[in-house]
Image (spheres, grey):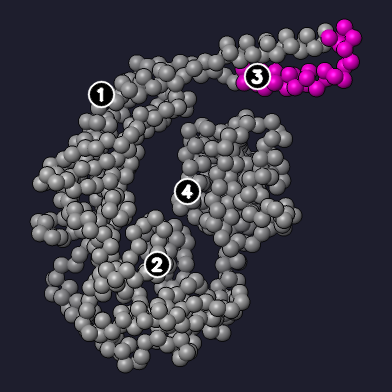
Amino acid sequence: MIAAIYARVSKDEKKSKSEQELDTATETDSVLRQVIGATAFVAARGWELNERHIYKDNGVSGALFADRPQFQRMMRDAEAGAFQALVVFDLDRFGRDSRRSMAALYDLDDLGVAVWDYSTGQPLDLDSFEGGTSTYLKTRFAEDFRLKIRKHTRHAMRDTAKKGFVTGGMTFGYDNVGKKGEKHWRIKPDEAAVVVDIYTRFADGDGIRTIAEALNRAGVPQPRAQQGRACGWSASTVRSVLERPLYRGEIVYGRSAKAWGKELRKVRPSTRREKGQIPKPQDTWIRVADESLRIVSPELAERCDAIREDRRTRYLASVAKGGRVPERAHGKYLLTGGMLVCPSCGGHFEARKYPWKGQPGDVYMCATRRRKPGVCNNTLALPIAETDDAVLSIVEGEVLGTRVIEDLLALVDRGVVDDSARLVAERDRLRGEVENLVASIAAGVPAGTVADAIRDREAQIAKLEAKLRVPRQAPPNIERLREALSLRAEQWRADLRSEPQVARLVLRRLVGPIALWEEPRPDYVRWEAPRQPENLLIGLEGERSVLVASPTGFEPVFWP
């Protein structure tokens, strides 16, 4: 039996009683405790456990499923037949949304994976009426527990806001001082000067993009700089500074609230996200005036508000007359959604549905360069139609071509190795050693001196016999696999041209993120991307045992 472990904890999730009992001075991390306990549970049953089959989501809500990377990796591995048993500390670690938890549990059951709850020491029973009902009630209680915590947390946060205390993280322009639960804001003079500068520039007629570019060129630190991404001021960051009531001496709490699943889709029916912020009615907001926190004078704030309202009025009037509004791609294009990576700043390219820098139509361009002026100098603006066609042509020839299929077949042929003969020889050798040790006892050697050696070899023999009992996979039918691969490649080549949404999924299976560079030669662009042709094998004969190597790599390709 090959086992896997799944462990999860939210950032601020309270510990259950059973977790508190396991807590020690040296094991303070909940995920670590879950893994240690589950590992001992697996070892006690003699199951096999590989490090890559330990899945840990730390600081992720149980209400999320698609946004839990390790959970999704676990489900993909289960679909590939990587393990037959999944061990969790408690069912609430698996998820805190009853409907989606049950759907995932039934998916695992259909894949032949038994889910074990090691807090009870029993596997989940989804086949019987009693077992199915009990499992559903457990998932429903887990969801109800999350909703109660959320309700109590919101109530406590509102009480904290009414008292004028900090209810979130750091705010640009202020320090958080005081003890936990009673922290209050204190103005930071250097950051406050930046806030006043933004308001002054805007009042003097500068646009928010102009202000962002000036701050970036001056090297002013950005609020909440993102790790691993190009840091800098964006137009939206400047806009949020101009809108924040705290800079005007007023604490406002409750303008929006986190929402998950159905609650979010009621407000945003078209969203595909699992969580987000939804606006709340103004009559539910908490407002607390505190002049000691004011950074911007009332006169300067009024001038900025008047300019913002005037620009908003003129913008709406232009739209009403038929003015064109720039649109984002929102996943409508082949290479959006992180497929094009800017090597200058590490940001993603986005699609813009209006001319940019003289381009005649829709283009891909660096989102950081557009949103954070002065941070990125990558001037690439790629026509969408031509770029999509070039990438698809290369994928059709370099990833879905005949040569790649033959390389994959060679990989399959090398990957399947029947090690039965080696296991039998090792078992027979150990049996011979056991016989010799037993004979030494008959010759007068004290039994106590050889007993441990005999037990050790017998344990090794038992493991080898267990491996020999596992059914050996028959060698793959290479000709049949060649036919299936060729058919799949042909279908995917057709889908790349005829089905845009399918093409996005196929492309992401075959090619990793694409990094772009401009070349000195006019009208040429260089790109590098990891190819993943081995994904053609997924779901076909032999794929579970042969993916032991990968013929991927970065290759520079040029297109005009």
In front of the other: label 4 or label 2?
A: 4
Label 4 vs label 2: CA separation? 26 Å
**Which residues are drawn in magenta?**
440-468
Label 1 vs label 4: CA separation? 34 Å
Using the image, tell me which numbered label, if any, was put on residue 69. 4
Left or right: where 205 falls relative to 174: left
What is the secondary structure assignment of the residue under circle 3? helix
Q: Give the residue number, with chain letter if any, for mark 2.
A: 267
- The amino acid type, in three-letter code, at marker 2 is Val
Left or right: where 550 falls relative to 132: left
Q: Is residue 147 visible?
A: yes
Q: Give the residue number, with chain letter if any, for mark 3.
A: 464
- Residue 366, percent from left and from top: 25, 56
What is the secondary structure assignment of the residue under circle 4? helix
Label 2 vs label 3: CA separation? 59 Å
Q: Is residue 268 magenta?
A: no
User: Does residue 542 sit above or below 428 in this rendering?
Assistant: below
